[in-house]
Image (cartoon, rainbow, N blue to C red):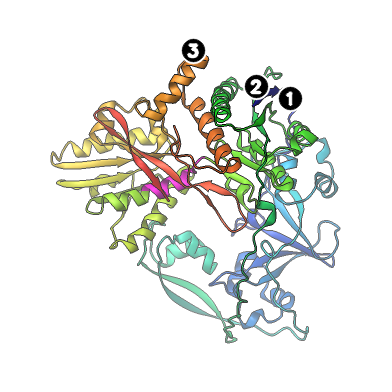
Amino acid sequence: MKHSIHYKQCLLILCLLVFSKGVFAQVDTKDWVYEYSNGKKYAVHIAQPGNTLWGIHTTYNVPVDDIVAANPGIEKGVKEGYRYLIPLGGADMKVVSGTIVREHIVEKGETAFSIAKKYNCSVDDLLKYNPGIDKGLKVGQVLKVIIAPTNENIPPKQADKPAVSTPAVTFTDTVLVYEVKPSETLYTISKRFMVPVNDLQKFNNLKSTNIKAGDIIRVPLKKENVKPVPVREVQPKEEIRKVDQDLIFKSKSKYNIAVLLPFGLNDKSANIALKNLATEFYMGVELAADSLEKLGFDATIKVIDIPLDSIGIMKILNTAEMKGMDLIFGPLVPQSADIVGRWCGQQKIRMVCPSACNSSLLKNNPYIYASVTTDMTQQEILAKYTIDNYKTAQIILINPGNSKDQELFDAYRKRFIELSKKNGNVKLIEAKLSDFTTFIRKSGESVVVFPSRDKGSVLSFINALHKAVGKSSNADVTVFGLKEWGGFDDIAGYYKTKYKITWASSSDLNYSLPETQVLLRLYRSKYRADMNKAGAHGFDVVYYFTKTLLMKEDVSNEVINAFDLKSVETGGGYENQSCFILKHEDYELIRVGVFYE
């Protein structure tokens, strides 16, 4: 097996950053799609369950008569799944009638190339419909993106009817008595019935937005005086999905593999920590190559210094050498992985993401393998672990109260509620950081879950917990946190052991295990140094995926990982659905086991 390193000079980073403000104060316009037709601009509204004509009118602040005129028949009832065109006035750009436009809010790290790829358009189109951006963009600009309409992003429009006189529509007040379903929030209910959250709070005398399954919410609605006609479409039978012949890879006597790592060899400003991470990962790659060669596997492995800018990346990818690869281990940076992953999808080359990647990369791209379990999946697995092992405990889930951690809170909560129904309705108490101590049992077992990455909040939580438990000598408390807590040196070992602080992690370097000791000896023999997590991860990723995808053989034990790849959706990529549960005992962090979603 040949190992070679191919160096490319890094180029300047091209960044096109734009930002757009909402058009109406009542709704967030970042997900809006527009259609241009006959010199007019329309917002495309996809009807959801509970939507009404009055709700659409108040949401978009467009007169009812104008909406009815543009959508004949809507006055007889808004049909779920249909799209309706909401007139917003004259068109602000010239395009062919029927053109679909999204006003994109660019996030940090995005480039013109990544935006174009995301919406399947070209950079030239961006320049054409956004004059002046070739001279640079400023935060706050609105970037218009022409997107190709598909059944996924633009559902079918309600069938047009002959335009006759616009019917007069009047409304009467009505109140819907609604029972909150599991995993629903006041926000999701407001979106469904198109009633602002503030209105729901005032109407129900709610002091906060906290609600739970089983609560009764009164929803103020406006009812059309034309009786809606319920229409249920007959769905066509789902066709048996044919096997994609492009995903059948024949065995070869010799393979070509690329490993793309950000060494930054020709970039004096390159991030030192990232360069070190790439070097340590590469050392593990070398060990994997040696082990595979001993098994008789024949391949040429190209280790390439990949730049961080999109232009530099594409120059490397668009070469005959790269197009001839059988497997690519992608960059360590998510933004770079996005570019490489979409290119691999076009070229039908399998790619492994060795670090966390954006979940959108897996959508409609069956050539991508995400080796690292997402933080949300880890929380779902932790919820399952809680249900299986702490059914009789008082289980308290604390809302971190910040937007960064909300997705983790929601992931744990939703999965817990789903599993609770199948396991005797295990009770979950939702609390705040300010009041969680009131729910801790004075005598008996309690589990307190606090999914927060914020160091200050975590330290405040630990202090409040210890103060409360100190008053109850018979209280038995176990804390579930996040792997990030391992880097919080302010949490004393005493607290970690006393409260058996537990978390889920996609990896675990345990030097006491036999497979770890074997690799450690090889590492020391080759490099005269001790192996760290990056090196062990590099070995695991390259060894496992090369052996399973190219050699078509099973791998019994990984060193630092536990791989269980599953397709995220039909026609999509594969995501690792397993992780470790780690727990503090006797001042040590031990591996409880490997758990799967």
Quick check: marks 1 and 2 in contact, CB under 8 Å? yes
Q: Amino acid at mark 3?
A: Arg
Q: CA distance from mark 2 to mark 3?
A: 27 Å
Task: Let me know if residue 109 appears in the view.
Answer: no
Residue 490 location in percent, x, y? 34, 26
44 in the magenta segment: no
Per the image, the residue denoted by label 1 is: 10
Q: Position of residue 486 (x, y in %)?
A: 38, 30
Q: Is residue 177 visible?
A: yes
Total count of labels: 3
- Report the quarter where the N terminus lies: top right
Label 2 belongs to which residue? 270
Among the 4 quarters of the image, the one containing residue 283: top right
The structure residue drawn at horizontal position 78% and vertical position 33%, both measured from the top left corner, is 315
Judge the density around disc 1: few (<14), some (14-19), many (≥20) Cα neighbours within 10 Å.
Answer: many
Residues marked 1 and 3 touching at CB (< 8 Å): no
Left or right: where 149 falls relative to 566: right
Q: Residue, x 72% and y 74% (percent of image)?
A: 66
Residue at numbered disc 3: 528
Identify whether 506 is placed above or below 539.
Answer: below
Q: Earlier in the sequence, mark 1 or mark 3?
A: 1
Q: Which residues are magenta?
A: 372-382
Is residue 482 left or right of 24 when viewed as pictured?
left
